[in-house]
Image (tube, rainbow, N blue to C red):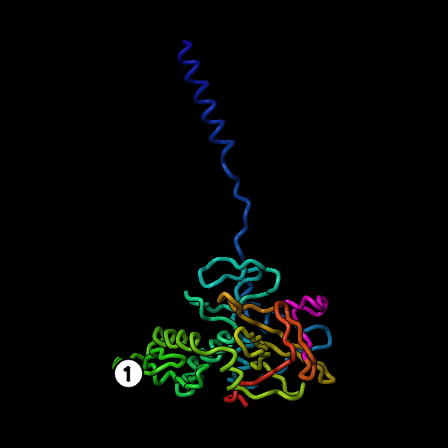
């Protein structure tokens, strides 16, 4: 009888261990409110302000309606790893960053504008100046033009292979990200010289190596004409494009006040000194 009693005790112990080691599932399914999944629908302007009306079909309207990841989504770099500081953003734009360390600050604006042109089938308008002052268009790339580095400049050669696919368009953008930046974007842009003229799609920029750029992705105004702004950026290393919080004015956050004449503009991770707000030449 003893062996049987011992076997029964062993079974009891195994059963107890199996029961005690189980994890009780307490998580809830993630419910995403699709009605609040874009910039314009998720962020209500402060009291007394309302969203500025954007021209239908414009780049400004495109940015206002850009889709967002669910709330509290973390910022990731180009490898998929979480960046070290997650306290500077309030939302992520739902657009990939690629698998190379290329789509950084100025490149984020270029990516959004290029995607806007692509979606609207304005293929002939897709083209950007490189830091070396050479202009490179999507039409050239899709028809087989490729780049070769020669000293401090890029030389163009013809590969003889035409490809107008979206996948090839992404390869074209990688070339632009590699050879363009804040210096070239600043050179291709015009200053916004008064506050009343600031609009969605404009950007703050500090050209240089390194430099930085932050995109205006939303504008709100009140009855007297005062404006507030939502700002978005990528950073180094290349990472998700994210909407910034306003650490300096938490009560207003994530909205910012901007002044073209301010000696400096402090954003969540960067100080623009002096303030330089510009608009891409094609959007004048």
Q: Is residue 165 magenta?
A: no
For the point 65% across and 77% down, which residue is it? 273
* Residue 99 at x, y percent in the picture: 41, 65
Query: In the shown orientation, is residue 195 left or right of residue 56?
Result: right
- Dominant secondary structure, magenta: loop
Tell which of 253 and 88 is nearer to you. 88
Q: Which residue is mark 1?
A: 158
Quadrant containing the N terminus is top left
Image quarter of residue 88: bottom right
For the point 47% across and 31% down, which residue is it? 18
Q: Residue furthest top?
A: 1
Query: In the shown orientation, is residue 61 left or right of residue 117?
Result: right
For the point 48% across and 80% down, which residue is it? 113
Image quarter of residue 246: bottom right
Neighbor class of circle 1 (other Cα within 10 Å; few <14, some 14-19, many 20+) is few
Q: Residue furthest bottom?
A: 284
| Span shown in magenta | 245-258
Tell which of 30 and 95 is nearer to you. 95
For the point 58% across and 81% down, which residue is it? 200
Q: Residue furthest left?
A: 160
* Residue 199 at x, y percent in the picture: 61, 83
Tell which of 135 and 240 is nearer to you. 135
Tell which of 118 and 32 is nearer to you. 118
Quadrant containing the C terminus is bottom right
Q: Is residue 246 magenta?
A: yes
The secondary element bearing badge 1 is classed as strand
* Residue 264 at x, y percent in the picture: 68, 77
């Amino acid at each position: 009888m003893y062996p049987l009693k011992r076997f029964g005790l062993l079974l009891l112990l195994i059963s107890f261990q199996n029961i005690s080691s189980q994890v009780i599932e307490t998580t809830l399914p993630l419910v995403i409110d699709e009605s609040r999944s874009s910039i314009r629908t998720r962020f209500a302007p402060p009291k007394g302000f309302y969203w500025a009306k954007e021209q239908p079909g414009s780049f400004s309207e495109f940015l206002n309606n850009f889709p967002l990841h669910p709330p509290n989504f973390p910022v990731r770099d180009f490898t998929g790893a979480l960046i070290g500081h997650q306290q500077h953003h309030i939302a992520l734009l739902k657009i990939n960053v690629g698998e190379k360390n290329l789509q950084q600050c100025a490149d984020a604006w270029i990516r959004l504008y290029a995607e806007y042109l692509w979606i609207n089938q304005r293929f002939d308008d897709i083209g950007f100046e490189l830091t070396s002052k050479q202009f490179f268009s999507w039409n050239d790339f899709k028809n087989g033009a490729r780049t070769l580095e020669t000293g401090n400049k890029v030389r163009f050669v013809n590969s003889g292979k035409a490809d107008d696919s979206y996948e090839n368009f992404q390869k074209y953008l990688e070339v632009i990200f590699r050879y363009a930046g804040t210096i070239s974007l600043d050179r291709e842009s015009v200053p916004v010289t008064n506050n009343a003229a600031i609009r969605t799609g404009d950007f703050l920029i500090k050209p240089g190596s390194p430099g930085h750029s932050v995109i205006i992705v939303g504008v709100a105004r009140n009855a007297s004409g005062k404006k507030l702004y939502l700002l978005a950026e990528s950073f180094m290393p290349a990472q998700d494009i994210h909407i910034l919080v306003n650490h300096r004015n938490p009560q207003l956050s994530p909205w910012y006040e901007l002044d073209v004449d301010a000696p400096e503009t402090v954003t969540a991770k960067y100080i623009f000194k002096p303030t330089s707000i510009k608009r891409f030449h094609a959007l004048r």
